[in-house]
Image: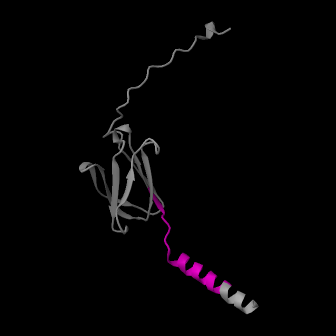
Amino acid sequence: MIVLAAILFIGAASLLYFRWLHDQEHTSVLVLNGSDALDGATAVIDGIALDGAIRGTFSEENRFTLKLFLQAGSYRFRIVRGDATLRTVVEFSLPRNTMITFNLQRDFPSTRKSSPPTESPAMSDVP
């Protein structure tokens, strides 16, 4: 019985080890900062290191910011809404252990009206 338990333990440990040995962790981060003008738009990221395109949607829930953890490599992304492509970025390189941020707020400024400042009492009015 002890021999069987030892064989099961060594088998399970070796499976975990080989999976860990061949699995690559995502070491780089791509951050896309948008605004409410991109609400509902989708970012499509594609690259050689990916099995398929990665998609993320800008929304109020993620504060119009997408954070994608990727392997080091060459990528490109485009912003789409429906069938229309709003912006395409030519290929860029994402080095290992780095974070690249694309600020899309310049291209897509906020459509919200800023509210006027609230009235606060002057210091002399406070008892």
Looking at the image, how many numbered discs can be counted on the residues?
0
Relative height, residue 5 to residue 30 (above, below): below
Quarter of the image where the C terminus is located: top right
Q: Residue at x 73, y 92 (%)?
A: 3
- Verify whether residue 26 appears in magenta: yes
Query: Which residue occupies the extreme front position in the image?
Result: 1
Question: Magenta part of the protein: which range?
Answer: 9-29
Q: Nearer the viewer, residue 53 or 92?
A: 53
Residue sitting at x 52%, y 14%: 119
Residue 18, relative to residue 69: is it above or below? below
Does 2 appear above or below 56? below
- Look at the magenta stretch and give its main secondary structure: helix
- Magenta-colored stretch includes residue 64: no
How far from the left and from the top, in percent, is residue 74? Answer: 34, 63
Observer-nearest of 99 and 83: 83
Q: Quadrant of residue 30?
A: bottom left
Q: Position of residue 106 (x, y in %)?
A: 33, 39
